[in-house]
Amino acid sequence: MALHVGIDLGTSGIKAVLIEDLSRVVAVAAEPVAVSRPQLGWSEQDADLWVSTVFSCLDRLAAVAPREMAAVEGIGLSGQMLAALILDDALRPLRPAMLWNDQRAIAECAELLAAVPDIGRRTNGTPDPGITAPKLMWLRKHEPQLMDRARMLLLTKDYVRLALTGEVATEPSDAGGTQLLDVVSGSWDPALCAAAGWDPAHLPPVLDSWAEAGRLRPELCARWGMTGPVAVAAGAGDNMGSTLGAGGVRPGDAVLTVGTSGVACVVDAAFHPGPERAILTSAHVVPGVFLSMGVVMSATASLDWLGQITGRAVPDLDAEATAFAARGIEAAPLFLPCLTGIRTPLNRPDLTGRMAGLHPGVTPAMLAYATMEGVAFQFADCIAAQEEVGVRPERFTVVGGGTRSALWLRLMASVLGRPLALIEGADMAGPRGAARLAAVAAGAPVGILSEPVPARREVAPDPALAEGLALRRMGMAALTGF
């Protein structure tokens, strides 16, 4: 019996899962984390809140499964990507972390692209305010005294691992999102650092994602009743961790994550950058392959927003939208739910949501349907853009909180014209991927990372629905004017 803990550090919540033999979930602990929005377009979090929430989740696991926790061999982390967390010489945060959906560094993107015109061919993609390097430039411009004290840049999961082990490190999948790393070589690039105004000496060492990046501190082993030693893996960016946990390990495997944001992750045998279509491409956590990522900035976040303005719970909106769609979709308005801009395929962080076709008969059910449909259309736009640059998705799996909606799944399958596989515990893909990395860090063979995950069932395209969606998608194109 091998036991590991996988921790997934999401934007709105953190989940820790105790897993036996990389298959059976023994116990789960999850807690929300707050996002601060001090100004329009800003998005920040207190990094120490990440640590305290992880510790609280592990406390709960130890309380409900003390025998299994005692035998844990490894811990793995996957985490929200692209944050800018600046530490001082004592490795303490100098300010809250700027998150992936922070939009303030728009001007700095243009400056970075002018300084390094081929940056999209060397790094994970074209400059975007959500990516780390433009944020560093913004901080240097607007908070220079703070940046004079900066001595380390860490990403979300890497800061939590520092708290767990006392060691500073990162790995290529997450580091690829900084635009300071040459993606093909997997090494920090001094010229890119210079363009962003960051000292390469203030970056952590880059390890393999599956490498042991430290061991759990003895006092924490005692706190959670672990006999130890407990290896802590270098870990993964959240998209890579979820893709691994969903079985996205072979070239052609595509994993669609319908979470707060949406990501179309396609495993690729070669590095196919697509900066002109705002595609992100980084190393995967499986040896020898890359991950092409098309990004939908607001996926379940769009439905959450609709729930807030209508006063309805999201499950109720889903049920109402399902009942509406069963009667026909023609009366629904068209909604482009780019509430925090569009990344793939336009790289337009400045865009806001658009709606057309409003009439006195529009109901919350129709708005909910239009929201899900609009997100499905955006996923289709991502896949089309990835195919344009040479990426070849062949097998589709869908994970994330949006998989709770049968309507959303049917819409996505019908828009894409592809069957979508569902795996057991789709909402556990991130922690499962992290646990796989933990197992290798604790001594399991690297080959376990390439083992597929069996599908529980498939959602097939609905031909009649697909016909109606094709007409509405043409209307969407006219609405956007892109």
Image (tube, rainbow, N blue to C red):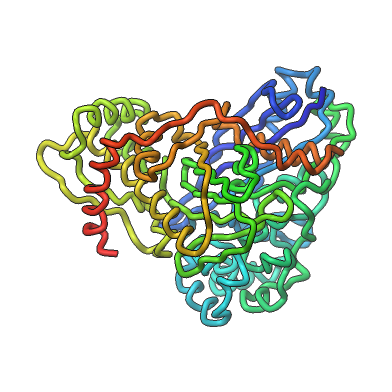
Question: In front here: 95 or 181?
Answer: 181
In this rendering, is residue 333 above or below 197? above
Q: Is residue 343 visible to the viewer in this orientation of the structure? A: no
Quarter of the image that includes the N terminus: top right
Q: Residue furthest bottom?
A: 115
Residue 254, x across and y down, in percent: 54, 46
355 vs 225: above or below: below
Side of 348 where 295 appears, left or right:
right
Quarter of the picture containing the C terminus is bottom left
- Residue drawn at (66%, 32%) of the image: 16
> Toward the viewer: 217 or 388?
388
Residue located at (62% from left, 78% from top) = 195
* Residue 450 in the figure: left or right of residue 257: right
Residue located at (45% from left, 65% from top): 277
**Relative vertical location of residue 355 with respect to residue 199 in this rendering, above or below:** above
Q: Residue at x 50, y 68 (%)?
A: 275
Q: What percent of the width, then of the height, locates residue 214?
A: 84, 46
